[in-house]
């Protein structure tokens, strides 16, 4: 099967750079599966796990928004933040989830609901990636 270079880049660093067979992302209009020689494309990404298929392995990366740019020979994900499973602290993600849920349910007076919902999505994304790796 054909391969292409996938780079996942944040403002701080290159999180992932490998030759892959397929990448699956959650774009603004739904889920996208990208194979080698895909037509050029740029679209925003939602907070969701990115699934990467390479040879006989699957990798999962917690990507927290950003954009995907598909080129002829390369796919670049420009993410606000991204974490590999080994970098995810489950206890910290669980505390962030609980804190966000409390804020949303009205546990803190005046809050920015959209900000709390985004924090909840990021925490759930991290926990989802960790769970996928364990399965």
Image (cartoon, helix red, strand yellow):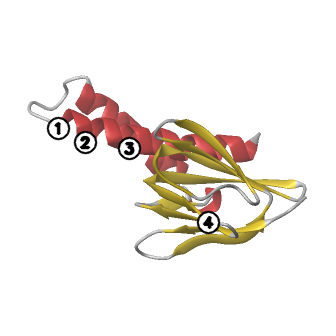
Left or right placement of residue 73 versus residue 99 in this view: right
According to the picture, the residue beneath numbered tag 4 turns out to be: 71
Q: Mark 1 falls on what kind of element?
A: loop
Label 1, label 2: how far apart the Cα atoms are = 5 Å
Tell which tag, 3 or 4, sits nearer the viewer: 4
As drawn, which residue projects farthest toward the left?
A: 110
Secondary structure under badge 4? Answer: loop
Residue in the image at 40% along x and 60% along y: 80
Which quadrant of the rendered structure holds the N terminus? bottom right
First of labels 3, 2 by sequence position = 3
Hey, which residue is sitting farthest front in the picture? 39
Q: Say few, some or many: other residues with alpha carbon within 10 Å of mark 4 (under 14 / 14 to 19 / 20 or more).
A: some
In the displayed structure, would residue 85 be above or below residue 120?
A: below
The C terminus - image quarter: top right
Q: What residue occupies the far bottom of the structure in this picture?
A: 13
Q: Residue 14, position in %: x, y?
A: 55, 75
Residues 124 and 56: in front is 56
Q: Earlier in the sequence, mark 1 or mark 4?
A: 4
Q: What label does residue 112 carry, if any?
A: 1
Q: Give neighbour class at mark 2: few <14, some 14-19, many 20+ (Cα, 10 Å).
A: few
Between disc 2 and disc 4, whose residue precedes? 4
Q: Nearer the viewer, residue 87 or 33?
A: 33
Q: Nearer the viewer, mark 2 or mark 4?
A: 4
Q: Quadrant of residue 115?
A: top left
**For the residue carrying disc 1, how many other residues have a C-alpha within 10 Å: few (<14), some (14-19), or many (20+)?**
few
Residue bearing the label numbered 3: 96
Question: Of marks 3 and 4, which one's residue comes earlier in the chain?
Answer: 4
Which residue appears at 38% of the width and 44% of the height? 96
């Amino acid at each position: 099967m054909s391969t292409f270079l996938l780079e996942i880049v944040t403002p701080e660093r290159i999180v992932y750079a490998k030759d892959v067979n397929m990448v699956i992302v959650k774009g603004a209009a739904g889920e996208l599966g990208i194979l080698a020689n895909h037509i050029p494309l740029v679209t925003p990404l939602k907070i969701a796990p990115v699934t990467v298929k390479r040879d006989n392995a699957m990798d999962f990366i917690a990507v927290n928004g950003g954009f995907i740019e598909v080129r002829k020979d390369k796919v670049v994900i420009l993410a606000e933040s991204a974490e590999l499973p080994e970098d995810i602290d489950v206890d910290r993600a669980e505390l962030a989830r609980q804190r966000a849920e409390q804020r949303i349910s009205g546990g803190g007076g005046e809050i920015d609901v959209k900000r709390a919902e985004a924090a909840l999505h990021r925490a759930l994304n991290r926990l989802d990636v960790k769970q996928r790796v364990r399965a």
